[in-house]
Amino acid sequence: MAGIFVLILFWLGGSALVEFLNWPIPGSVMGLMGLWVALVINGGVPEWLKKPSSLLIRNMTLLFVPAGVGLINHWDRLTEHGLAMVVIITASTLLTVVLMILIFKLFRVKL
């Protein structure tokens, strides 16, 4: 239970920070960055956090349901700008993968 509580605290903390600073990024992303920094400082994932994290990863497909509903609600935008969105998503994904590889190599983080 403590692990879920800590994950929710990072999520809420990231959301509060983004709201306070009026940044144009999702609060959950900022919370995830804070969690990543805490785990790097800690030297890894503690045992009490592994179980709730695994539970969330195993049920991750449920977290995509709201995204699917959003696609249906904005179908007109998708049909109008679909190709541009696919290009942007692909380019940003590739850029993220390359940057993460470089960051992992720079800090020699082992999974």
Image (spheres, grey):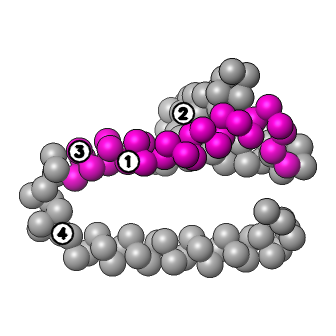
The boundaries of the magenta stretch are 44-71
| Closer to the eye: label 4 or 1 | 1
Q: CA distance from mark 2 to mark 1?
A: 20 Å
46 inside magenta stretch: yes
**Which residue in the protein does label 2 denote?**
15
**Which residue in the protein does label 4 denote?**
81
Contact (Cβ within 8 Å) of mark 2 with mark 1: no
Q: Earlier in the sequence, mark 4 or mark 2?
A: 2
Mark 4, Cα crowd under 10 Å, few <14 / some 14-19 / many 20+, is: few
Residue 76 sits in quarter: bottom left
Q: Is residue 76 visible?
A: yes
53 inside magenta stretch: yes
Q: CA distance from mark 4 to mark 2?
A: 29 Å
Q: Amino acid at mark 2?
A: Ser
Contact (Cβ within 8 Å) of mark 3 with mark 1: no
**Which residue in the protein does label 1 denote?**
64
> Horizontally, is 11 left or right of 90 in the view?
right
Give x and y (percent) for residue 95.
54, 76
Which mark is drawn over residue 69? 3
Q: Is residue 13 above or below residue 37?
A: above
